Image (cartoon, rainbow, N blue to C red):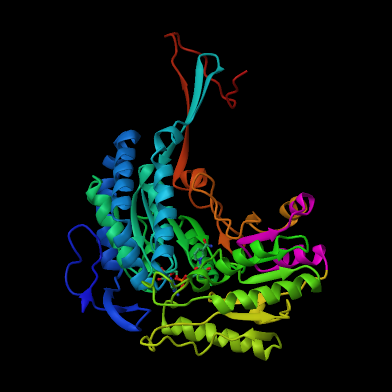
Amino acid sequence: MRLIDHFVVGGPGGPAARLGDVFNPSTGAVQAQVPLGDAALLDRAVATAQAVQPKWAAMNPQRRARVLFKFKELIEQNMQSLAELLASEHGKVVDDAKGDVQRGLEVVEFCCGIPHMLKGEYTQGAGPGIDVYSLRAPLGVGAGITPFNFPAMIPMWMFAPAVAVGNTFILKPSERDPSVPNRLAELFLEAGAPEGVLQVVHGDKVMVDAILDHPGIAAVSFVGSSDIAHYVYSRGVAAGKRVQAMGGAKNHAIVMPDADMDQAVNDIMGAAYGSAGERCMALPVAVPVGDETADILREKLIAAIDKLKVGVSNDPEAQYGPVVTAVHKQKIENWIQTGVDEGAELVVDGRGFSLQGYEQGFFVGPSLFDHVTPEMSAYKEEIFGPVLQIVRAKTFEEAVELPTKHQYGNGVAIFTRNGHAAREFVSRVQVGMVGVNVPIPVPVSYHSFGGWKRSAFGDHNQYGMEGVRFWTKVKTVTQRWPDGGAGDSAFIIPTMG
Ligand code: NAD
């Protein structure tokens, strides 16, 4: 059995007391094991990260950027193997896995411009002979805790800006697909980063708690489900850390009667079922406005689902693969049953899907519900599987209200040809990322990513300038270079007047 190691300076230091299984979701077999680390291992990683950090921060930002440039090239050269490794542990198809790597790579590209972003602000002559400037200083040691569903992109969202600004970083990736994060850390070292700037510790709740409580870690970035995001936020903040914690989602696609229906169906299909629905920016809820729109949408979706191809993750023809674990498959199937029990109409049932030759794989076929209503728990909660729910709205007002009142506020999309309706929607909907005729509005790397309500706790978004702000603190200097004569002492607050 292949054993995946921690990626810490000095090696893992002896056999792990606890191991976790890493599956191949296409076959259902255990393909590797990962050590579940503890506080003692973290202590070592933090000590290294603290020792290395001042030197890394003192390196001029252009030299740090050169490491990132080289890292970017190495990722590009290794794209195929990274995507295959990722797909084999996650279950998403290889082309989709390339997208996972690519969207992380774009954040690395953004961070190559870090010298420009750290320039700070300057005021000459704020008072007589007085200049004021502010600079952004790194925090010290940062940590990232990431979910299973984007094992390349989300670690890069976090560590690229964190290290670019001069922090050292400890990544605790999901224990379900831990190999790609290790591989990224190897490539970062190969790109010329000093040892210890980026380390990877594996584990579960034990390791997460150790990170949250460790006095040597200044900031924690988390992405995962909402209850755990809230827990991480509360415990991390109580320990005096800066914390950003992104949570779950239930994103709506509003379909107006004037929408280009074929385009909308095409987009919703990809966004609802792509990656087996295991995306925080998936569109698991379609909200057609008016019964006529709903009926057309429903028929077109049924026809498209009929043509959808589910397969193993390395099948180039497959549009989506298995879900991540047998436990998650069961959870999705339970939610389908809950939807039925609550009175929604199950139009297409994806349960019991089996692929010949891969009967033990964690496959769930595409499911479609109609006549889902806001009171149903299957609507309120995140399912995170290939399940699309149609919630019929009578009016535009009702359609705006659904995502606005939902507990989650990550992403939303509207499909329409009416600019005014789109504009109204954008300004009124209470959601952090909005698409207008764009199904998965994940912002480009030089904007930033973050939801509202229970989809994010904390103050800064991921990546872009928001990432730079999260991973730095501002120091403001007020300086005077006197001409030699002593001034009078002042016992009142100094003013510049
Ligand atoms: P998860 O919450 O189970 O795990 C996320 C991380 O938390 C992992 O590293 C895991 O080891 C750790 N963890 C798990 N249980 C814990 C516990 N009890 N205490 C402390 N730490 C714990 O999430 P997941 O299943 O890996 O990922 C899917 C979830 O992530 C979905 O809810 C999805 O919407 C969300 N997600 C959100 C975003 C976003 O940006 N908002 C992006 C991707 C995924």
Residue 324 appears at what percent x and percent y?
42, 76
Residue 52 vertical placement versus 251 (above, below): above
Residue 278 horizontal side relative to residue 289, left or right: left
Residue closest to the eye, 460 or 239? 460
Residue 93 vertical placement versus 359 (above, below): above
The answer to whether residue 356 is magenta is: no
Residue closest to the eye, 471 or 111? 111
Residue 126 horizontal side relative to residue 6, left or right: right
Residue closest to the eye, 471 or 28? 28
Q: Magenta part of the protein: which range?
A: 395-422
| x 55%, y 85%: residue | 350
The answer to whether residue 405 is magenta is: yes
Q: Is residue 239 visible?
A: no
Of the 4 image quadrants, the one containing the C terminus is: top right
Residue 87 vertical placement versus 116 (above, below): below
Of the 4 image quadrants, the one containing the N terminus is: bottom left
| x 65%, y 89%: residue | 340
Residue 422 horizontal side relative to residue 213, left or right: right
Residue 430 appears at what percent x and percent y?
70, 58
Residue 395 appears at what percent x and percent y?
83, 66
Q: Is residue 478 visible?
A: yes
Residue closest to the eye, 212 or 370? 370
Residue 407 vertical placement versus 68 (above, below): below
Quadrant of residue 186 within the rendered picture: bottom left
Residue 295 appears at what percent x and percent y?
75, 75
| x 27%, y 77%: residue | 33
| x 77%, y 53%: residue | 418
Count of picture labels:
0
